[in-house]
Amino acid sequence: MEQIAAIPWFASLELTLLVRRAAGEWLWGEGDEDTGLVAVIAGGMHLYSQAPGGREVLFGMLPPGTVMGQSAGLGGGPRLVTAIAAADSQLFLLSDRALRETAALHPMLWRSLSVLVYGQLGAAVQGWVEAIALKPRQRMIARLLAMSVAGPLPLSQATLAEMVGVSRKAVNGWLSNLEARELVVRGYGRIEVRDRVGLERMLADG
């Protein structure tokens, strides 16, 4: 409970369900009608979306400390992405029913939902800008900075390469350089940012 209370968006909401997902297990699928919010307590969730032609594209990850979702009952629609556990994960779910009940007791929920949606939209816009404006190595650094909000990432080099849209060989070379500068540390299926300021400086310098 201390961990979930540390996530600002959930500070004033009534929680409903603590769940666990093993690595590779689905949380929800794109197009699912059963909507609501999720907070990642431990582990992480890979995010996929269907590209033209039906190919599932990995485009992001929810690390511990992040909140995501939407509500069909509050003016939204079906799930926009597929979420699959990147590692053994612990999650808090807030269903549509819980959202409605909480809104009845706490009218400021509407403002909180607007803040959450605005944040998700901002992240999407930032991703589009990075895809257009940044070189591949810069895109990788930007992704690492965006995802590294709370400790090591359950992220393999192959998965990071897929997110950035480059080869695993390229990502391995870039990470080796960053590790030599003591900016990141790699482990089996994990990457940890050690020096955010140094990475931000490299991103700004191009």
Image: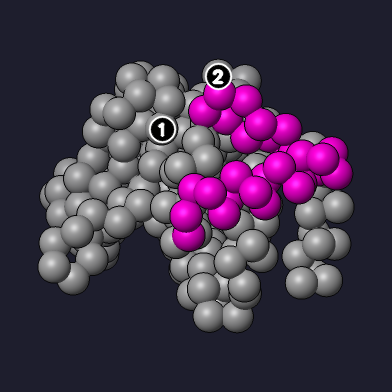
Q: Is residue 177 magenta?
A: yes
- Amino acid type, callout 1: Ala
Position of residue 74 measured from the top left corner of the image (x, y, whole percent): 28, 58
Position of residue 4 measured from the top left corner of the image (x, y, whole percent): 55, 28
Q: Total label count?
A: 2
Quarter of the image for residue 86 reads top left
Q: Is residue 22 magenta?
A: no
Q: Characterize the local packing of mark 1: few (<14), some (14-19) or many (20 or more) Cα atoms within 10 angstroms.
A: many
From this viewpoint, is residue 35 visible?
Answer: no
Task: Please tell me whether residue 89 is drawn above or below residue 55 in the rendered image.
Answer: above
Quarter of the image for residue 51 reads bottom left
Task: Please tell me which residue is depicted at 62% across the width and 72% down the height of the picture.
Answer: 135
Q: Earlier in the sequence, mark 1 or mark 2?
A: 2
Q: Quadrant of the C terminus?
A: bottom right
Which structural element holds mark 1? Answer: loop
Observer-nearest of 156 and 15: 156
Q: Tell which tag, 1 or 2, sits nearer the viewer.
A: 1
Task: Please tell me whether residue 165 is drawn above or below residue 130 in the rendered image.
Answer: above
Position of residue 92 measured from the top left corner of the image (x, y, whole percent): 41, 29
Position of residue 80 measured from the top left corner of the image (x, y, whole percent): 26, 58
Q: Quadrant of the N terminus?
A: top right
What residue is shown with label 2? 1
Observer-nearest of 57 and 181: 181
Which structural element holds mark 2? Answer: loop
Image: magenta residue range? 166-193
Observer-nearest of 75 and 154: 154
- Residue 86 numbered mark, or none: 1
